Image (tube, helix red, strand yellow):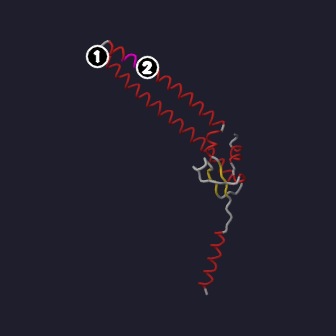
Amino acid sequence: MKNILLAITSVLIISTIAFAEYRIAFVNVTKLLNDSPEAKEKRSSLDARAKKTRDSLEQQREELRTTEKKLRDANTPENSKEVSALKSKARDFERSMRESEEALRSEYIKINRSLSERLIKAINAIAKEKALSIVLDKGELGRSAVLFGDKQLDITDLVEERMGV
């Protein structure tokens, strides 16, 4: 008798869990990360910094090429002070180029992390307010978890408002 009662109770509990209502929504994270005014401003600032760095590096590269051509045209010996100085400047240039690339990459990651954290906080707040069970990333068609979703389930606009976009 205990086994039958236990079995019936188990079936009732499992069926209750199976038929529980889940509230699902989706949000276009890509759109929010790329199209927000803050993202555009930071990307523009980073692009301007990258252009300034590229221009400076290109100028240095041209100076090295000009110096190399002069030394080659003058048949300067390999072991001369001038050639040694050029080689040293070329190594410094390569190091400077790597450091600049790493600094820009690091800044990009920092900006993206900051925007992502703000976005996740806004999504979490809205999910709690609306008692959502799951929030999926809509993203680009074919590259996201949502292949179809009713427009009423899309909370992208609410997240934009929450973030002050």
Secondary structure type for disc 1: loop
Q: Is residue 165 above or below residue 49?
A: below
Residue ID at (38%, 16%): 67
| Percent position of residue 25, x then y | 67, 54
**Name of the residue lying farthest toward the top:** 74
Q: Quadrant of residue 20?
A: bottom right
* Kind of residue indicated by mark 1: Ser
Residue ID at (68%, 59%): 23
Q: CA distance from mark 2 to mark 1?
A: 21 Å
Secondary structure type for disc 2: helix
| Percent position of residue 98, x then y | 43, 31
Magenta stretch, residue numbers: 60-68
Residue under label 1: 80
Q: Is residue 31 above or below residue 103?
A: below
Q: Residues within 10 Å of mark 2 (few under 14, many from 20)?
A: few
Residue under label 2: 62
